[in-house]
Image: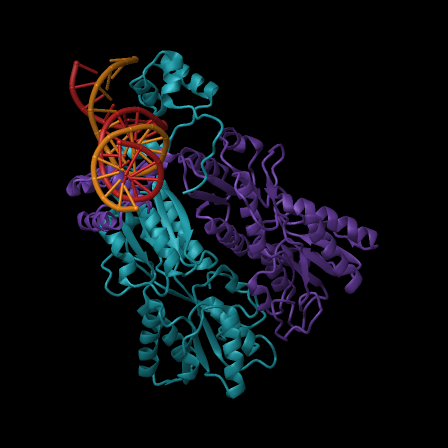
Chain colours: A cyan, B purple, C orange, D red
DNA sequence: CGTGGGTGCACCAATAGCTTC
DNA sequence: TGAAGCTATTGGTGCACCCAC
């Protein structure tokens, strides 16, 4: 609680009313664009409000109506372009029906996340979409559940939380990656590279990926499949370390495009000395097509994912929501990093 | 205005009070952690509140106290990593003193921006930090000014708006780039590539860059210096087009790292057929050190820029703000794309 | 077309009641 | 009896919506 601005006395609705010899109810009707007021009165009120510097107090109105148009989007990393793009879709769907979407950044800290969620509950927000912090547990969402604030969990699953969940089809992603590496490129020894062990997407993807490659007869490289921060820098350092110890697997599915960037750098992909290793990313960030070599990636239209999430939240709030509530299916966008195209050729984003 | 949840009757402070035979004032004191209440009473109140499912209504409290802890960060593009990183700094400084920072995305549309700013004013937010939409004019900020809501303009200047401004030192960036290209690499013909003509940073940087390179005796390539969307894709397409028409300048300062990525791709930098052209980016995104070739870039610590911005806002709100209120000075981080290092060698972010 | 009275929920200043020494 | 220290309460307030007339 901060930020009171002393000094200038605020103008209230009743001041406008008194100044014109009207009642506050009339002024209220004007402010809400009600047709129950004559054109003449309306104009007089608007003019007087303008003259006095009156500013409608939405907060007071919200208190009375028990409604709010604020929807909180609580996420661990605003710098992640995939997540940022998801937010566009959420905003699109909810903005259309009059909600006001704002983003809060937990920086992946449970403490901050708890504080933010508590604040949204306290402010009586209309709804919440949240990507849980990595170390979050069911306890962190108990307050949310009890408050009845409509909530949708995004991308990361939390054990024991029975809130609606929207996320990518991790099993399909794993299968797509496995199929591409084994069937198209004939890889014999593969790995799932990067990602935090606590992140549910890693678990789901890796499981189905491993099952599929094993069925296809390829070997599993456990050393390269250890968990790891999902940053380019961490991936680069880990890969460089592993390359000291021996040759890499001949096919790698990376936890994200960011991870793939670091790995590509370490492998010196696109240079004459490059290691013979097919690299796949996940997310298909806009930059991946620009990379040298262009990064092959498994895409799941993040904007549409955001839209789906918005629709699920609308449903949760008891409002009509037109359109699909099923996350988009992942697609393979094959480029140079796996060997599908020549390394120095530009490749469009659509694959 | 949306999102009323009917059904369950909410528990109010007075319900807790009645249930215990206390007054609402006492419950209020407990909720605010006041020392004016005995330990026994406090515990009883907390237990009863928990049991009844009472949830403190921050909005009602805000109405009474005329204070709010919400600070809005209104920006045109949450997907821009530089901007995202600035938001971290803002959040750090304001969070420390109890404010709650939320981000609203204008997607660079003035209409949406106007709506968002109006909403923040109406909700009586404690303050606003905004990166104006590209086509914004002074009119778009008239309401803000009149409302007295403490505001800081970030990164983009708007003519005729006398609100406090925090941004990078564009002149210094231009000079740094010019000096590096001419003095270190001996470039004879240079250009400023990319950026929207309406963006004040482009104007400031290009002006000082052009003056400095001219003084150093280098020629100016007007065709390569035309304005352009600041995306990697647009830069790639424009560069490819210009390369059809003839050879590129031998030194290019790009409006951002994103632009540099597109240009590097078009020039096939890092490949045997690469054009002899020194490329500099601006922002030094984390990824730039990972790029192939690693991208030389002019850095201006975005987190610190955000901190400065937060402190300026605090001052604007009449609160004490320790620490510098001067934006960090830009620094040259020379890597491979300008020819300072070998193309296939990894380079650390610190240059 | 326009109005009065009541309501949403909690803060705040002033004050009263109770111990204790 | 009185001063000092705690604790808890009353009544008014912040601003606008809503119903009934």
> What is the quadrant of the N terminus of chain B in the image?
top left
> Is B159 left, or right, of A61 in this rendering?
right
Rendered position, A111 above or below A99: below
Image location of residue A234, percent across then percent down: 50, 72
Image location of residue A218, percent across then percent down: 37, 84
Image location of residue A9, percent across then percent down: 45, 25
User: Can you name the residue that lies furthest to the bottom here?
Assistant: A246
User: Considering depth in this image, is B143 or A267 the residue closer to the camera?
Assistant: B143
Image location of residue B96, percent across then percent down: 47, 52
Res B18 → quadrant: top left
Residue at 29%, 18% in the rendered image? A36
Rendered position, B124 above or below B47: above
Residue A88 visible in the displayed image: no
Rendered position, C1 above or below A128: above
Rendered position, B168 above or below C10: below
Residue A200 visible in the displayed image: yes
> Is A182 left, or right, of A121 in this rendering?
right
User: Considering depth in this image, is B316 or B295 the residue closer to the camera?
Assistant: B316
User: Considering depth in this image, is B281 or B24 the residue closer to the camera?
Assistant: B24
Residue at 33%, 52% in the rendered image? A117
Res C6 → quadrant: top left
User: Considering depth in this image, is A319 or B228 the residue closer to the camera?
Assistant: A319
> What is the quadrant of the C terminus of chain B in the image?
bottom right
Figure label count: 0
């Amino acid at each position: 609680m901060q930020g009171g601005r002393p000094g200038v006395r605020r103008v209230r609705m009743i001041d406008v009313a008194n100044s014109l010899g009207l009642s506050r109810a009339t002024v209220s009707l004007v402010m809400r664009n009600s047709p129950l007021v004559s054109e003449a009165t309306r104009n007089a009120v608007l003019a007087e409000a303008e003259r006095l510097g009156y500013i409608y107090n939405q907060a007071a109105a919200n208190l009375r109506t028990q409604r709010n148009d604020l929807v909180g989007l609580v996420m661990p990393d605003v710098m992640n372009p995939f997540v940022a793009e998801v937010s566009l879709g959420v905003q699109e769907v909810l903005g259309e029906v009059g909600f006001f979407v704002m983003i809060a950044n937990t920086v992946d800290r449970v403490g901050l996340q708890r504080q933010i969620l508590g604040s949204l509950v306290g402010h009586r927000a209309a709804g919440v979409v949240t990507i849980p912090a990595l170390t979050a547990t069911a306890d962190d969402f108990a307050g949310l559940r009890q408050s009845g604030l409509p909530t949708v969990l995004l991308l990361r699953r939390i054990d024991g939380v029975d809130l609606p969940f929207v996320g990518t089809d991790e099993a399909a992603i794993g299968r797509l990656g496995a199929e591409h590496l084994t069937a198209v490129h004939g890889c014999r020894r593969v790995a799932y590279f990067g990602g935090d062990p606590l992140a549910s997407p890693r678990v789901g993807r890796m499981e189905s990926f491993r099952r599929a490659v094993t069925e296809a007869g390829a070997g599993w490289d456990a050393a390269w499949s250890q968990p790891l921060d999902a940053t380019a820098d961490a991936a680069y350092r880990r890969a460089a370390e592993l390359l000291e110890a021996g040759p890499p697997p001949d096919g790698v599915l990376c936890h994200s495009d960011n991870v793939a960037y670091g790995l590509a750098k370490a492998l010196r992909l696109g240079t004459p000395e490059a290691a013979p290793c097919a690299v796949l990313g996940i997310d298909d960030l806009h930059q991946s097509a620009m990379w040298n070599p262009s990064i092959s990636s498994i895409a799941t239209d993040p904007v549409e994912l955001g839209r789906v999430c918005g629709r699920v939240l609308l449903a949760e709030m008891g409002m009509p929501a037109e359109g699909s509530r099923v996350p988009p299916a992942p697609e393979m966008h094959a480029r140079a990093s796996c060997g599908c195209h020549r390394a120095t050729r530009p490749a469009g984003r659509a694959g």
